[in-house]
Image (cartoon, coloured by chain):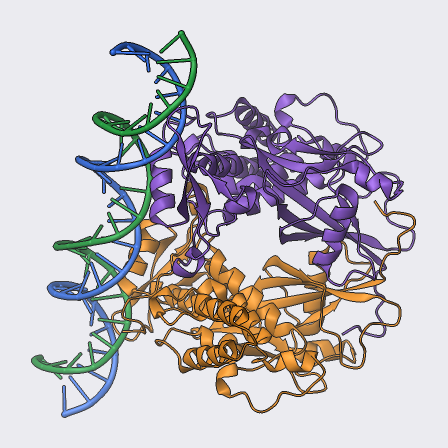
Chain colours: A orange, B purple, C green, D blue
Amino acid sequence: MPVPDTPTSPVTVDLTAVIIAVTEDTPVVLVLSGDDEHRPTLPSGPLQPRHGTLQAGLRNWVERRTGLSLGYVEQLYTFGDRPLPPGHPRREDGGRTLSITYVALVPEAGPVPDPTRDRTTARATARAAAWVPWYACFPWEDGRAGDPPARAAARAALETWAAAAPDAETRAARAERTSLTFGADPLAWDGHRALERYELLYEAALMPEAWWDAGRAPPGPLGAWSGRPLVLDHRRILATAISRLRGKITYRPVLFELLPETFTLLRLQRTAEAISGVPLHKQNFRRLVTQQKLVEETGALDPDTGGRPARLMRFRPEVARERPAPGVRVTATRRGAYP
Amino acid sequence: MPVPDTPTSPVTVDLTAVIIAVTEDTPVVLVLSGDDEHRPTLPSGPLQPRHGTLQAGLRNWVERRTGLSLGYVEQLYTFGDRPLPPGHPRREDGGRTLSITYVALVPEAGPVPDPTRDRTTARATARAAAWVPWYACFPWEDGRAGDPPARAAARAALETWAAAAPDAETRAARAERTSLTFGADPLAWDGHRALERYELLYEAALMPEAWWDAGRAPPGPLGAWSGRPLVLDHRRILATAISRLRGKITYRPVLFELLPETFTLLRLQRTAEAISGVPLHKQNFRRLVTQQKLVEETGALDPDTGGRPARLMRFRPEVARERPAPGVRVTATRRGAYP
DNA sequence: CTCGACTATACTCTGAGTGAGCATAAGGGC
DNA sequence: GCCCTTATGCTCACTCAGAGTATAGTCGAG
């Protein structure tokens, strides 16, 4: 319902993909090799008239850029307030760029992205694709091996920031948010708040992106704990995807999108741990998965388990009809870390 | 990263609001009086250059259209594949309209929308705003008084549709989806699947919108069970909002956005029931809310309870720091319906 | 060929949380 | 005071989840 006398913005829409896999118990995301400043970038491309639907447009871009043909795809969020490049406070025509972002899950065994594929079609934009581990970008999010040092470092930096607030009220508010998202009790750590944590760190100017977006250089090296930045707001987008996924695995059987047709229970557990960033109790995890009837036996055994061979399982899709919210509960073991 | 040789679509962006309140235990949504065919429409307006952020643009439009100034607002979904008006298979310039949709929650006690406010600013587009009960649009979603007749009617219509499938495979798939979303067991009813249910009914051509979108008139009256349609895809958007909200109240304290500053526990329960469409066990609900420390006593009593006066409570925001997922569990009482 | 390392799998114990319902308290109308 | 209404307190049974112990297979070193 456009109103006649009101101008509308010229808008460019970018379709951006967060493509997730879990390889050797490591959660990874697909990026294209860096921009001018050598920062990795998520695959994306502009929405075009020939794209029938938004999702079709996304699949098309990903295929052209990386050769990957996606399976599970889900819309993530629409970002409209992109940081503008310094020196360009606003586009001349008053327009703006929207990013409609999607998460895609691909099984480890899926085709490996092949940038040459793109080059053969003579695209000037072809760049090398690579898998980057999530936790290289978010070291504080990986609690699988116990409370990571980066977590304490982030908390300390935030506490300094909170204490430096101009007035008591701001100080209290900052401390409140810090304790809410980075609370010191490892048992109360809430994996779902990954996005909140990134946003807090950004706001506290502890992420270099905050400085770049402001058109300035970071005051100094921020330390290894702060992780690897991506171009523009792509690290924020990745944080959004992580938060969303961590929630989703608890009530929908999406984990299986990340696994091959058959897998062992340990493999399933490691995948759940990779996504949630938390160590799980092995026996209880198996009990949960089996008595929820999420999987069924194939009858085959995995030959290279190392010890006693594990049974190979397969996902049982019927579970969706039987249980309202089939998924894996993720509560960290009290002892922290793997046994 | 636009690619030089690829055309981009001219895109118009519409910001659309699903504004929710609960009045007298009825969940309602704010609509503007009908379009040409007298169908209600959600408040919306085009994104403009002067809007700083998407959310600011939305708030601005809602304020201009209805006089409401929104509190809690959350992005819902971006729809890009709007049904095109019949006779216009595609816009001449190849462009399209995106709808970025938001859910807003307002307390019952909030200001009542006043369309005259808009008229005084001489907008030709001013139309009367009204609150429409959700369940007028989705009669099958309201299970508070026990299994509603509309639910059985919808299921029956879907089963007919499934049986009429051309081949056995399609037949099985349709029956599967029907039983997944509309399963006959009232105990297994999953409130979160509201969107899936609407989409299934749409696909089965049991919603008039499906016919309109195809450029045809529905073959006949569909029966009261099919509920009240909205303009374009707005009923789908509302279904998306319902699904999202039903999920969210279980792990975030958003219910309180719908309530005045102080309220009785029964009022809180009725609000939870209104949103979830399911009757709750009174004593257990109180136990949950109190021992989760979601609320605290104000010391005051509600004078017009009817029987024994109820204590007035208030939300305790500190709970967000103490509990990872503060919210109200919604499991229907086994007996169904209110006692 | 036996032992030890390693991993898979089975089972037990225990306490917290939840579904259900009974019982009691505190108002109002008559 | 009786009865209706709603609020509030409490019990009981049962399920499920966290933690840990115990047993079963397989491999490789000695």
Name which residue lies at 29% across and 65% down: A282
Is the residue B4 above or below the residue B199 in the image? below
Residue C15, percent from left and from top: 20, 54
**Left or right position of B4 against B179:** right
Residue B55 shown left or right of residue B258 in the figure: right
Question: Is residue A100 positioned above or below B58 on the image?
Answer: below
**Where is residue D8 shown, x and y percent of the image?**
32, 36
Q: Quadrant of the C terminus of chain B?
A: top left
Q: Quadrant of residue B283?
A: top left
Q: Is residue B100 above or below residue A113?
A: above
* Side (left or right) of A271 relative to B90: left
Q: Quadrant of the N terminus of chain B?
A: bottom right
Task: Return the x and y of residue B107 as percentages of the image width and height.
Answer: 59, 42
Q: Position of residue B302 (x, y in %)?
A: 45, 33
Nearest to the observer: residue A201 or residue B70 = B70
Image mark count: 0
Residue B20 to residue A98: above or below: above
For the question of whether residue B81 can be seen, the reply is no
Q: Which image quadrant is residue B323 in?
A: bottom left
> Relative to residue A201, is residue B314 drawn left or right?
left
Residue B38 is at least partly visible in this image: yes
Residue at 74 percent across and 24 percent down: it is B219
**Residue at 71% in and 21% down:** B221
Residue under the image location 59 percent in, 63 percent down: A103
